[in-house]
Amino acid sequence: MFWPRFAPVEVMVELEFGSGFEEMHEQMSGYKRMRREHQAHLVKLEEKCKVDMEAHKTALDKEYDTLLHNFTRDLDRLETKHQQDVERRAKQTSAAEKKLHKEITLKQENDRKVYDLNRKKEYKANKERWKRELSMDESTPKRQRDLTLQSQKDNLKQHEAQEEQRMLQAQKQYIELEMRKFKRKRMIMQHEHEDQQLRDELGKKEQQLQQAHAMLLKHHEKTQELEYRQQKSVHQLREEQINKQHDTELHNQKDYMDRIKKELVRKHAVELRQQPKSLKQKELQIRKQFRETCKTQTKQYKRYKAQVLQTTPKEQQKEVIKQLKEEKHRKLTLLGEQYEQSIADMFQSQSYKLDESQVIECQRTHEQLEYELEMLTAYQNKNKKQAQEQRDRERRELENRVSVRRGLLENKMDAELQQFNQERAERLRMKHEKHTKELEAFDNESIALGFSTLSLIEVSREAYADEEGSLSGSMISLAHSNSSTSFPAGSL
């Protein structure tokens, strides 16, 4: 706290034990009280800012934790949904497989019934034809004809048995092939469904990551706004306190200057009132000195007169006494005039000295007060400049902290996004490798069972279940049966 020198030494001595000292002590106490109040207000504001910031961070953390909790809940729901879809599709696949196997089996049974019916008709027609042909040959004995007929019957039955066995084998191969095709297609569909589920999961996680990053950026902006607002309030309070302190200092300094000027005027007035009394005393001293001088001159004159008369003739003594009296009167008159002139010079010199000393004292006091006011103003300007530089430095430091925090947040988000992209690519790759291995293992198993990969990827002549597990009956309806779809052509 700057405290100017109040007055010259002369005035300070007069005020040291007077009202001026008490006022100075009161001002110093007021400054101390003001500093304590300012510091208490500043500490209170800083504590409030700290509490507000803690509450702000707590609210942001709670909001972010709630968001993460919702993310976990949404992912659990999605995982449950995917698991339910997998189980539902597994049931649908199992049901569709059984239904397809059943319908192909029914169709093949119908084909065998038709084959048996045609075989019996053909057997009866061949039997009648052979009988007619043999009855027309009368040269052959009856027994021989019967043996020939029986032999043809046996050959036909053997041929029919072979054809039936070939048909059953073809049907077995056909149904096994169709079921392998069905299983392969269903496996591919399952792989596609798993890929889609994985894409849905990864898309959901990417969306959540973007939402989390957006919230973090929003929280950063809110925290930045609160920090700037709190710093502005603290700086504003400090500036108001400095202005109030400076106004009080200037007011006290001006009061002090007015008081010093009034005290100086009062002092000069007292000096002027005391001046006549002092001059009268000096005049009396001079006149007393003049009378003493006159007495001395008179004594000397008497001794000189006695000496002169002793050496002067008696007839001339009267004349000599007259001359001596005239000389005595002349010298005393001259001495009186000199003393009167000294008194007049004393009055004139003392008045001039008094006026000159008062003017000089007023001038010095004014210069001293102006110097102190300039010093106070310079100190306050320096204090304001330092306070402004401190505020600017604190603002720059806060801006740097906010910028660094924003950079760290962006780096963290970029790292998380890069890590997510790597994990997504890795999971997609692993899923693709898993599906490829499963399909290769299935194809190798099919080859081991005697099915070629080409035959498995051919378009099936049967209608497979769609994604919802329903079967289309346009191609496997029991109302239409063609043996060529059950076993190879020419087997009949």
Image (cartoon, grey):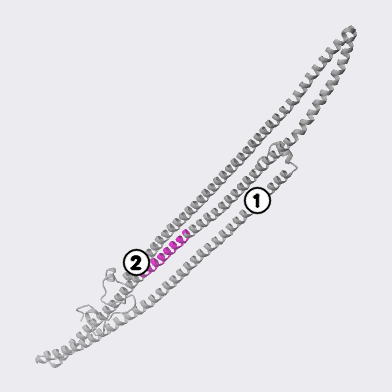
Lateral position of residue 314 relative to residue 112, left or right: right
* Residue 71 in the image, given as x and y percentages of width and height: 47, 67
Mark 1, Cα crowd under 10 Å, few <14 / some 14-19 / many 20+, is some
Query: Which residue in the protein does label 1 denote?
Result: 34
Q: Which amino acid, by three-letter code, is at mark 1?
A: Met
* Res 202 seen here: yes
- Per the rendered image, the range of residues in magenta is 192-217
* Res 1 seen here: no
Do the numbered discs 1 and 2 sit on residues whose CB atoms are within 8 Å? no
Q: Secondary structure at mark 2?
A: helix
Q: Quadrant of residue 14?
A: top right
Image quadrant containing the N terminus: top right
State the mark number for residue 440.
2
Q: Nearer the viewer, residue 197 or 145?
A: 197
x 50%, y 56%: residue: 224
The answer to which of marks 1 and 2 sits earlier in the sequence is 1
Lateral position of residue 419 relative to residue 319, left or right: left
